[in-house]
Image (cartoon, rainbow, N blue to C red):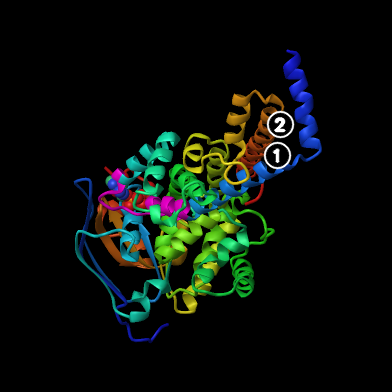
């Protein structure tokens, strides 16, 4: 019990004094997960929109695939990316293993299906409302997608935030492909695992608080967005 | 328009449309050559909405032909459709009305200016920065009409534009439609309001069970309907 109280006090001190390691780890975590969320958004949103407004033979299959990919265990994604980028793998020559870049790649694979799937749901509802008008006005395919993305922007920001939330809390994949190297690829989740293993509860708790703080910010933003979507002006 | 040589502007030949094994429109054929407003009448489920949508190209017909005699009318960008229930975009009223112009590449400022003018034209006097969702039923109808008019269409379809409107709003919309008609725009409109049909109709197309039962000049239709279905409908009887 005493250990925990002591740990809490030290954790608070680390945060208040902006401990160098803590700041560095948090910054890397944010930049990796934000980059992954942005890339997943750029790929996932148009993909979800496209799936929502197009009828093609393999459509059901693609949606089922997307849902299956959503449930992909991150550790397995990590393993596959590791194999692909390891020295003997097809992308080995790039020398990206154990760099933040490959961590971003792994996270993009994990969260793009989530972003695309949430976007697909939102756009499908909007498309049902807008369908007749957009067809009647002879809007081009690109204009239709543009309109739906713009008018559905709040729901879509929720999709991106959900992706970011998943990325920032993810540990299995980036541990494998990033290697948790000090001052290079160490992020919040992997650092917590390491510090806990070493018995350094103060540092682990401090990192944990930052992570919880970020999770709260993400969920609060999602909540506020969905509230403005329902009540306030569009 | 009196004295002008009558030429056909729209011709349907044997148009048939089936959905789920059922004929929704059967063997519809008519020629329109009058410049007045074309009123499509008929009981619920007669196929009015489907006919309007098919002519506008929103529904695929199974057989038959729909021919526009004038290229200007055939251009679907010169046609506009006001739906039975207005399509509400998640935007402000002015941005909703301006939307078709934005698709045409008009910049936001000029498009919004035009939208304000269009709102004024249809008598929509609310705060145009409000989200369109909070408008009343009648205001939504006017918004939809303003949005349809903003591209200055050559052909205007209206599917029961005055359902749920009070007398004053109906009158305002009718006045707008007459002005639009007088600029040479062709109007095809469905309605259940017999009084309105009587006021506006240049031509009446009376549908029943997916068939065109009667095609007549407006006054003739209301003073002496030729078919039993139309007679019963006009006197408010049940069509069996
Ligand atoms: N996609 C569809 N699939 C099956 N049936 C349809 C479809 N669209 C329309 N129908 C049927 O076709 C018939 C005509 O419908 P339509 O909407 O054209 O009628 P309407 O004359 O506009 O009626 P109302 O006065 O109620 O608006 C109805 O019986 C309707 O159920
Ligand atoms: Mg109808």
User: Dot 1: few (<14), some (14–19), or many (≥20) neighbours within 10 Å?
Assistant: many
Which of these two is toward me, A41 or B229?
A: A41
User: Dot 2: few (<14), some (14–19), or many (≥20) neighbours within 10 Å?
Assistant: many
Instruction: Work out which quarter of the rendered image holds the C terminus of chain B and state it.
Output: top left
The main secondary structure of the magenta stretch is helix
* Residue at x-position 75% and y-position 29%: A11
Tell me if residue A51 is in the magenta stretch: yes
Residue sitting farthest toward the top: A1
Kindly identify which chain the residue marked by label 1 belongs to.
A
Which of these two is toward me, B161 or B195?
A: B161
Q: Residue A228 sits in which quadrant?
A: top right
Q: Which residues are magenta?
A: A43-61
Whether disc 2's CB lies below 8 Å from ligand 1 is answered no
Which of these two is toward me, B84 or A41?
A: A41
Residue B6 rendering spot, x and y as whole percentages: 32, 82
Residue sitting farthest toward the front: A87
Location of mark 2 (residue) = A206
Which of these two is toward me, B163 or A28?
A: A28
Q: Secondary structure at mark 2?
A: helix
- Residue A117 position (above or below residue A207): below
Location of mark 1 (residue) = A22
Kindly identify which chain the residue marked by label 2 belongs to.
A
* Residue at x-position 57% and y-position 48%: A32
Sequence-earlier tag: 2 or 1: 1
Residue B90 rendering spot, x and y as whole percentages: 56, 53
- Residue A79 position (above or below residue B180): above
Q: Residue B187 sits in which quadrant?
A: bottom left
Tell me if residue A186 is in the magenta stretch: no
Instruction: Work out which quarter of the rendered image holds the N terminus of chain B and state it.
Output: bottom left
Residue contact between numbered discs 2 and 1, judged by CB atoms under 8 Å: yes
């Amino acid at each position: 019990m005493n250990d925990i109280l002591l740990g809490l006090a030290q954790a608070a001190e680390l945060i208040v004094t902006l401990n160098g390691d803590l700041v560095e780890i948090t910054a890397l975590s944010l930049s990796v997960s934000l980059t992954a969320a942005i890339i997943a958004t750029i790929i996932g949103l148009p993909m979800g929109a496209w799936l929502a407004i197009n009828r093609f033979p393999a459509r059901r299959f693609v949606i089922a695939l997307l849902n299956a990919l959503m449930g992909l265990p991150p550790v397995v994604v990590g393993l596959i990316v590791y194999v692909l980028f390891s020295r003997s793998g097809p992308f080995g020559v790039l020398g990206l293993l154990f760099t933040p870049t490959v961590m971003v790649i792994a996270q993009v694979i994990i969260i793009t299906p989530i972003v695309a799937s949430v976007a697909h749901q939102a756009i499908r509802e909007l498309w049902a409302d807008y369908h007749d008008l957009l067809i009647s006005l002879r809007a081009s395919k690109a204009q239709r997608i543009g309109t739906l993305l713009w008018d559905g922007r709040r729901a879509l920001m929720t999709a991106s935030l959900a992706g970011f939330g998943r990325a920032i809390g993810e540990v299995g994949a980036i541990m494998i492909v990033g290697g948790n190297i000090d001052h290079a690829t160490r992020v919040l989740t992997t650092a917590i695992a390491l510090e806990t293993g070493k018995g350094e509860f103060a540092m682990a708790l401090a990192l944990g608080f930052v992570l919880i703080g970020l999770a709260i910010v993400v969920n609060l933003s999602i909540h506020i967005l969905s509230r403005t979507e329902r009540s306030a002006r569009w | 328009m009196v004295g002008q040589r009558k030429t056909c502007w729209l011709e349907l030949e044997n148009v048939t449309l089936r959905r789920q094994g059922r004929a929704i429109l059967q063997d519809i054929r008519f020629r329109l050559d009058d410049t007045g407003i074309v009123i499509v009448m008929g009981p619920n489920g007669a196929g009015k909405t489907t006919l309007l949508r098919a002519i506008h190209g929103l529904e695929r017909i199974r057989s038959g032909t729909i021919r526009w005699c004038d290229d200007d009318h055939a251009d679907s960008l010169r046609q506009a459709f006001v739906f039975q229930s207005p399509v509400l975009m998640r935007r402000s009223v002015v941005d909703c009305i301006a939307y078709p112009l934005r698709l045409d590449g008009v910049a936001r400022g000029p498009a919004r200016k035009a939208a304000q003018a269009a709102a004024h034209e249809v008598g929509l006097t609310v705060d145009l920065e409000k989200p369109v969702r909070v408008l009343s039923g009648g205001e939504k109808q006017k918004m939809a009409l303003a949005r349809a008019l903003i591209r200055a269409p050559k052909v205007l379809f209206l599917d029961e534009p005055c359902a749920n409107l009070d007398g004053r709003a109906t009158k305002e919309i009718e006045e707008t439609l007459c002005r639009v008609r007088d600029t040479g725009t062709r109007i095809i409109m469905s309605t259940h309001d017999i009084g309105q049909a009587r006021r506006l109709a240049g031509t009446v197309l009376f549908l029943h069970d997916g068939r065109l039962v009667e095609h007549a000049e407006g006054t003739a239709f209301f003073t002496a309907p030729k078919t039993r279905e139309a007679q019963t409908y006009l006197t408010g009887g049940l069509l069996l």
